[in-house]
Amino acid sequence: MPRGVLVLFAISAVAALGEAEEWEPEAMLLYNSSSPEINDLRARSTGNERLRRYAKALGMLHRQPAREEDALLAKLAFDKLLDVNPNDDVGIASAYYLARISHRHLDRPDIESAREAYHYLFENFPRRFFGELAFLKYLLLEFYGSDARESPGDRLSRLEGLGDRLVIPDMRRGYHRSIGEAYLTYDLSKTKAYEHLKLAYDIDTSVPETQLDLILKVAELAELHGDLGVAIGALNKFLKVTRRDERRSDVEIRLTELRRQLVN
């Protein structure tokens, strides 16, 4: 994700969660050690040894090229931070990244440990950024990595209501988008997919450039369901947001046709 997108994503998270410490939404930006954000965090951590160690651990985790050796060193650092205090902002963030290491940073991922850790975070830290982010990761692991004996439809029914507790707009968008995409991927219900994707689409974002595929899917499903006004609005939004996308010409043609249908 581009750095500027991460910055705006953090700002929206702050607005939704007034109780979050100032550094928490900034800390979650730090996806690579060369970013100005992590250097800024290091600079501001002067005198705060716990925050300095957290920033150092993030730097190790996202060092390029990615190596398991660096991830394991970061794990040791996050473990120590978690042992000192598992409930403050640094502790919660460290717990999230420990789950993430098990999920994505090992040569042989430990999916079950990651699943349990994500579940613990969202159950014990509701209305917190890393708790809600952990929920989205848990949702994907549960849906796409669960027991194959459970049908996709049953799995969705089990998971669908869990996202009602989310309060951060970006997380709610991610939840509805994940559920809607699942309905499409398994060809379960285009109507349910439209309901969820439309909910995701309706949640404002400061960075609509990250939502182009969602916009087009909503336009397609809206047309399918006879909501021509929604379809036209979505295609207009696509053209407004992007200037160089190779899909622009096709969108312009479709938009002209939908406007003609609406008039007639």
Image: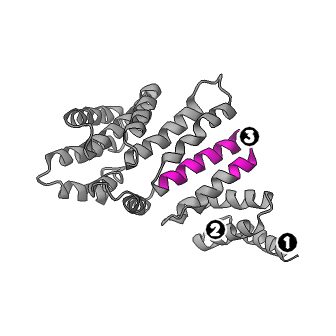
Q: Are marks 3 and 2 in contact (CB under 8 Å)?
A: no
69 vs 87, nearest the viewer? 87
Q: Residues within 10 Å of mark 1 (few under 14, many from 20)?
A: few
Residues drawn in magenta: 170-194
Q: Is residue 140 left or right of residue 152?
A: left
Which amino acid lies under the numbered mark 1 shown in the image of this protein? Gln
171 falls in the magenta region: yes
Q: Is residue 169 left or right of residue 215?
A: left
Above or below for 129 versus 5: above
Q: Residue at x 67, y 60 (%)?
A: 216
Tag 2 residue: 238
Q: Residue at x 25, y 35 (%)?
A: 82
Q: Which mark is residue 188?
A: 3
Q: Residue at x 33, y 35 (%)?
A: 71
2 vs 217, nearest the viewer? 217
Tag 1 residue: 261
